[in-house]
């Protein structure tokens, strides 16, 4: 997680252009999504960057910095294996954190 000033500076320079029909293009909606991610401890990208892919990411702190560990999986496989994928990523994040 970055501090608010860094996040705001980044968002000021990078417009929220739609890549799919599900892409968040509203800043308030994006900030609400950030709050949800922070609350649940992981992020899901439900086909917001590419129609056929869903992504899952978890934060990893350690090894000299902050990292994000993520996977991108075809939609059907993602939905069928979400709990397994989330558990695996969270376990790896603990090992390296």
Image (spheres, helix red, strand yellow):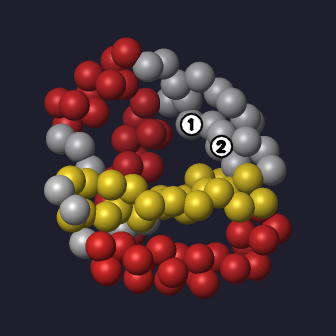
Q: Position of residue 64 (x, y in %)?
A: 17, 56
Residue found 74% across the figure and 36% down from its top = 21
Please name the residue that numbered disc 2 is placed on: 48
Give the image quarter of residue 9.
top left
Q: Nearer the viewer, residue 95 or 12?
A: 95
Disc with the residue nearer the chain's start (1 vs 2):
1
Q: Nearer the viewer, residue 4 or 63?
A: 63
Instruction: Answer left or right for 13 relative to 72.
Output: left
Outermost residue to the top: 13
Please name the residue that numbered disc 1 is placed on: 24
Residue 11 in sight in this render:
yes
**Relative vertical location of residue 7 with respect to residue 45 in this rendering, above or below:** above
Residue 37 in sight in this render:
no
**Relative vertical location of residue 31 with respect to residue 79 in this rendering, above or below:** above
Residue found 36% across the figure and 68% down from its top = 41
Disc 1 + disc 2, Cβ < 8 Å: yes
Outermost residue to the front: 63
Give the image quarter of residue 13.
top left
């Amino acid at each position: 997680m970055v501090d608010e000033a860094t996040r705001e500076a980044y968002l000021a320079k990078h417009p929220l252009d739609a890549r799919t029909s599900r892409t968040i293009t509203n800043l308030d909606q994006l900030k609400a999504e950030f709050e949800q991610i922070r609350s649940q401890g992981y992020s899901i990208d439900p086909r917001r960057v590419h129609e056929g892919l869903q992504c899952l990411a978890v934060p990893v702190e350690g090894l000299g910095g902050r990292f994000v560990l993520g996977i991108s999986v075809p939609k059907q496989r993602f939905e069928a294996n979400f709990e397994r994928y989330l558990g695996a990523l969270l376990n790896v994040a603990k090992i390296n954190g």
